[in-house]
Amino acid sequence: MTSGIRDAYIVAARRTPVGKAPRGSFRRERPDDLLASVIRSTLADAPGADPAAIEDVIIGCAMPEGEQGMNVARIALLLSGLPDSVPGVTVNRFCASGLQTVAQAADRVRLGAADLVLAGGTESMSMIPFMGSRPAFNPRVVEADENVAIAYGMGITAEKVAQRWEVSREDQDAFAYESHRRAIAAQDAGHFDAEIAPVEVTERDGDLAAGTVAERRRTVSADDGPRRDTDPQKLGKLRPVFAARGSVTAGNSSQTSDGAAAVLVASEDAVKRYDLQPLARFCGYSVAGVPPEIMGIGPIEAVPRALRQSGVAQQDLDWIELNEAFAAQSLAVMRTLELDPARVNPLGGAIALGHPLGATGAIRTATVVHGLRRTAGRYGMVTMCVGTGMGAAGVFESLA
């Protein structure tokens, strides 16, 4: 155990492409396999690191059941080829799970309890539906008005945010279109190349009459979500899906998705010992609670806390990854905190790129770390709202 607070460095960060659920590129890929694949790619970016020296693998998952149950962290790390001696734990803070794991890994390093920790997240919304296979709310949730919002669908909370913060349908659709426009521009320019670890998938088609199975392999190297055929007019024709006279539609909400990411966090001692190249320094992380019925405004409370803890001024943030759960809540957060739209999601967000729940925080960490390096920015933030009324935010300093 080392005394005093040490620095924690991100030395590798990779993510899979994000597939659409339930009919996208990874519809038949298990979440533990996706995670195992990206773990291998992440460690390949830190070739000097001794896999046996990894002291823990901390993985986020929002619906840890079925194919992503039974401590998916431990199962995936073994499938990836890491030694039996490496332990693993699965963490659930809903949409902030992937960011939570990065913070926990960094905390262990900062406190001197570990020198090398792998963080990340995985989620298959194709295999495990939103809210899980068998939701079972405590009956007391609906017996008292002060708790009933726990059972609200996320879309209803977005409608309440849109009403209270006066976010118009037109503004939501314009925001959604811009998310797609930026994501497509980023794909065309190759801006995701440094963060994406391509995944080889095997597709099988059976012919019952012939009694044969045709098998083909292909490599998935780009996100499924960005739509080149969308525009504000098409988005404007979509009907509200959560409230009859509402403004939240499938087009201005995040996409259900499949994906995984991994982030290797190291101490200065490990950086020197294994000749690693730090990409960024972890500066701080904070979470905050808000009323469940307006859960989307969680970052309004979490962002100032994370900035104070990190000693970074908001105006010094060069890059902000604000998870676009819904256009309504994203705009409410941006307007309240007075975030510069040019610095928020410069490569598009979850409306275009997808939101594989427990993996998103780690995915967006990879985006901000590599984005800052490419643009020579210094400080970046990852922030999101969280189900049942929370917000989370993490701050990073690029070492490019």
Image (cartoon, grey):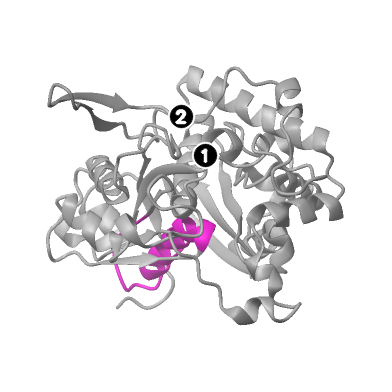
Queried whether the magenta region covers residue 4, the answer comes back as no
Residue at disc 1, secondary structure? loop
373 vs 214: above or below: below
Specify the quadrant that holds the C terminus: top left
Residue at disc 2, secondary structure? loop
Q: What type is the residue that disc 2 sits on? A: Asp
> Residue 248: which quarter of the image?
top right
Q: Where does residue 327 sit, x and y in percent of width and height?
A: 70, 42
Q: Can you tell which mark lies on residue 354?
A: 1
Q: Which residue is mark 2?
A: 224
Queried whether the magenta region covers residue 100, the answer comes back as yes
234 vs 122: above or below: above
Q: Where does residue 75 sit, x and y in percent of width and height?
A: 22, 59
Q: What type is the residue that disc 1 sits on? A: Gly
The magenta segment is: 94-120
238 vs 254: above or below: above
Q: Magenta segment, principal secondary structure?
A: helix
**Residue at 41% over, 44% down:** 126
> Residue 388: which quarter of the image?
bottom right
Q: Nearer the viewer, residue 160 or 380?
A: 160
Q: Where does residue 399 sit, x and y in percent of width and height?
A: 45, 44
Is residue 41 among the parts visible in the rendering? Answer: yes
Q: Can you tell which mark lies on residue 92?
A: none
User: Label 2 near label 1: C-beta < 8 Å?
Assistant: yes
**Residue at 68% over, 28% down:** 178
Q: Residues within 10 Å of mark 2 (few under 14, many from 20)?
A: many
First in residue order: circle 1 vs circle 2: 2
On the picture, is 74 further left or further right than 256? Answer: left
Specify the quadrant that holds the N terminus: bottom left
> Residue 293: which quarter of the image?
bottom right
